[in-house]
Every structure is written in C-alpha cells, then in structure tokens.
Image (tube, rainbow, N blue to C red):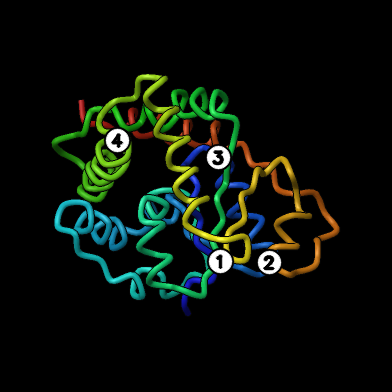
Amino acid sequence: MALKIIGAGFGRTGTLSLKKALEQLGCGPCYHMFEVVERPDHIARWYRLAFEGVMDWDALFADFQSTVDWPAARFWHELAECYPTARVLLSVRDPEAWYKSMTDTIFEALQMRIPTSGSEPRRLQMQMARKLVLQDIFGGSIEKSHAIAVFNRHNDEVKQAFGPDRLLVFDVKEGWEPLCRFLEVAEPNEPFPRLNDTATIRAMMKRMRESEPA
C-alpha cells in the first residue's frame, strides 16, 4: 500500500480532525503522531531518522494510505518525491490561534524533562520529537514572533512547491466540501469531525508526568 495523501501541515492545524475525516472518506488508515506513540517499533524508526538519517518509507507506511501531523509533516518534501502520485494536503490555521494552541500543548510537551529511567520507547519518542520538531523546525526557539514566522514560511514553501492539481490548502473550518472535491469523493451525510485534541494531548501529558519515577 503506497501513500495516496501526504499531510504537509504543522501540528495544531486540526490534524486529528483531518485524520478522522480522511478515514471516514476511505483514505485510511491515516498516520499521525498518535500512531507513533502506540508503536515502539515506529518510535525506533523515527529515532533513527532523527539522529542517523535512515528511513524506509515504504516499510513505515506499509499499512497506511495517508499521513498528517508531525513527525511525517517534517518530511513533506521527501515524501512528495518518494510518492509522486500522492496528493498533498496543507492544513492551515490562523497563526495567532495556532501559536496559542502550540503553547498550550506541543511546545510544553517538547520541553518536559526527559526521564533517565522507565520506558525506553517513551524516552526515544521524546528525544526524537525534540530533535525533529523543536530543533530542526524551530531552531530551538519557541519565541512567538519567531515561531509564527517559521509557520508562515513553511506554508509558503509548500504552496510554492505544488500546483492546484496536486495541492489543497485546507482549513478544517471549511468542512467537507473542498476536501471531498479535491479527493473526488462524495460528501458524507454527517458533520465534519471536530476533535478537541488539545484536551487529549494535555491529558496525555498529565499521564506522562504522573508516571515519571520519583
């Protein structure tokens, strides 16, 4: 199974809602950071990519038709070259709202203390995410003006890389119509998914803190 849809949007642009929407449209399973944290073997693959530059994309995505969110979105260009027939989805959001959401969730998680004992997959996942997202994408700085500039620059780069036949710039607030038109599928007779992954991520972070060795 080769990837058919590549999500190029940053985390906190409605990627969990988009994951659910793609799966409802028959474009799943859809890869997301939540898929990574549930699979120790995938954590190890991403860790090797982060620190050694090694990845077998076909093996990683063998069971998936689409991908959204980090860490895969970090490699949107490589994935677009690897899967030249795949369509590209750039999920976007108001930059100020995006930064607030990042501050409340992912930026906080990326700065959590990495435990020296306990679960090895968890340590590797935290180290991998810190390297690929905090360091590689944001250069180690989460200062507001810098982070928003990185966000806007990334979106511009993706928009310039593809024509409208391959790329959809999509805000989840737009609902089914533009997404279904782009994918050439019928619109479902149900509301577009609205998943509050801020609450989900904060609950996950709370569990992580509580599980840390004393």
Residue 58 image point, x, y percent: 36, 75
How far apart in space, not on screen, are marks 3 and 2 (Cα)? 19 Å
Please give the label number shown on residue 97: none
The residue that label 2 is drawn on is 183
Amino acid type shown at disc 4:
Leu
Residue 190 image point, x, y percent: 82, 54
Q: Residue at x 35, y 63 (%)?
A: 78
Q: Secondary structure at mark 2?
A: helix
Compare marks 2 and 4 and give the one earlier in the sequence. Answer: 4
Q: Secondary structure at mark 4?
A: helix
Mark 3 surroundings: few (<14), some (14-19) or many (≥20) residues within 10 A: many
The residue that label 1 is drawn on is 87
Residue 94 image point, x, y percent: 60, 30
Tag in front: 3 or 1:
1
Compare marks 3 and 2 and give the one earlier in the sequence. Answer: 3
Image quarter hosting the C terminus: top left
Amino acid type shown at disc 2:
Leu
Q: Secondary structure at mark 1?
A: strand
Q: Nearer the viewer, residue 149 or 100?
A: 149
Q: Is residue 105 left or right of residue 89?
A: left
Instruction: Check whether the beta carbons of the residues at disc 1 and disc 2 lie within 8 A of each other.
Output: yes
Compare marks 4 and 1 and give the one earlier in the sequence. Answer: 1
Q: Is residue 192 left or right of residue 134?
A: right
For residue 213, above or below residue 128: above
How far apart in space, not on screen, are marks 3 and 4 (Cα)? 17 Å
Q: Nearer the viewer, residue 179 or 56?
A: 179
How far apart in space, not on screen, are marks 4 and 1 (Cα)? 27 Å
Amino acid type shown at disc 3:
Thr
For residue 196, above or below residue 108: below
The residue that label 4 is drawn on is 134
Mark 1 surroundings: few (<14), some (14-19) or many (≥20) residues within 10 A: many
